[in-house]
Image (spheres, grey):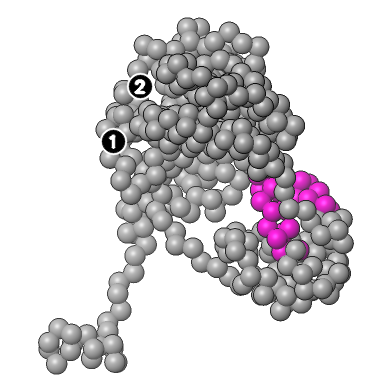
Amino acid sequence: MAQNSNNAVYWQELREGFNQSLESLGYSKRKLIDYSWALNKIERCILDHGLPGYSIETGDRVLSEIKGQYHKASQRLIRTVVCRLNDYSLGKFNIMHSEIKRAKCPEQFAETLYQYTEYLEKLGRSKSTIKQSIHYCTQLLHYIDSQGVNNLSDVTTVHIYEAFIDSKSNKSCWATFCRGFFKFLRKSKVHATDLSVAIPITRRPQSLPSTYSKSEIEKLLSSIDRSTGLGKRNYAIALLAIRFGMRASDIANLKMVNINFCNKTLSFVQTKTSVPQRFELLPEIESALHCYLTNARPKSSDPSLFLRGVAPFTGIEASAVSTFVGCQFKKAGIPTEGKKHGAHALRMTLATDLISEKVPYTVVGKILGHESDGALKNYVRLDVESLRSCSLAAPIPTGLFAERLLAYKGER
């Protein structure tokens, strides 16, 4: 790789070679766009300071200058790209890991794991759920393989318990996904018994959902600067999350064809559950969408409804929705200490407001696109007034407890 007299690699040559390496490693189109954004920031630093090219010192200067200028996620991205550039400029190509490189399932279990994947697809599980299932099951199968077991019918409860103890992953997630795998093995008669019952039950502390008052939500909306194109887009996004309780992934995946202004409807299939959803456009949402599409949406052949604010004008990611909401909470001066303040908090707030207004749980479930009433249990916990009506009188203390209580009060 050519270097100038100052021991710095010529930038354009470095960037072109770096991009080719990323493509050869199987980096996704979305990731390449993100890396391109970070590379532009590095190039701007080189030009602004009249540097002869890129060097590790240049990377250090970039990292020192980005502090406080960008959101934490953007800073992490730039740091990652700088580290990758340093590796590449030093010829450490093997350090750059491919995104698609994953642990492979032991060969003797591969066919069964593939059948389990097909089974999950038939059940309508989301891609993210299937991906996690395969990840944890692969870990399990590697452990079973390490114990000299070549046939899944020979797996015992001892193997399962030891695999659970040995796992360095989140115990609760491991137990949940592996439990489903063993139920499948019994159902498909690969194993004579249902070994899912041998997986230890884990408990995770359940925190209360983060919600905000109506005044705080309106303050959030009013803090969005709608005089700019980006503000018009973000205002429409915020309304969809606040009024319809839409998930960030569903907002990001909306296409132009999902909106019917003639019938005043918004129809889409939920990313997480694959359940169709349909809303009647509220006047304020219809107005916000029309304003964005008419005055702010960049000209692009991309079918996505909401596009990036800078070139290339492609559809936004779900992370962009959550990042915007989080930043807007801070900009609006809304206290968020100890509370979540992403797009999901807006969904939680809508559900809690509806339940507090005595809207039936089944109706709330349909609005939020839930498949079962059980998904609403987190929101029910916030309906304090209704829970009070279910409270029971405390029993009169008796026996040893009564004696201890009297002693504590100093009455005995």
Q: Which of the two labelled residues, at mark 1 and mark 2, occupies the earlier sequence position?
A: 2
> Which residue position is annotated with label 1?
334
Q: Which kind of residue does numbered mark 2 sit on?
A: Ile
Q: Which residues lie in the magenta part?
A: 114-141
State the residue in front, 325 or 15: 15
Q: Residue 169 placed where, x, y %?
A: 59, 60
Residue 290 against residue 248 in the figure, above or below: above
Q: Which structural element holds mark 2?
A: loop
Confirm whether residue 99 shows in the render.
Answer: no
Residue 148 at x, y percent in the picture: 82, 73
Q: Looking at the picture, does residue 138 appear above or below residue 227?
A: below
Mark 1 vs mark 2, CA separation in Å: 13 Å
Q: x%, y% of residue 282? A: 46, 21
The answer to if 132 sits in the magenta stretch is yes
Q: Nearer the viewer, residue 91 or 168?
A: 91
Q: Quadrant of the N terminus?
A: top right
**Relative depth, front residue between 281 and 245:** 245
Element under disc 1: loop
Q: Residues within 10 Å of mark 2 (few under 14, many from 20)?
A: some
Residue 215 lies left or right of residue 39; in this view the side is left
Question: Is 39 on the left or on the right of 147, as rendered?
Answer: left
State the residue at coordinates (71%, 79%). Answer: 158
Would you say the magenta stretch is mainly helix, strand or loop? helix
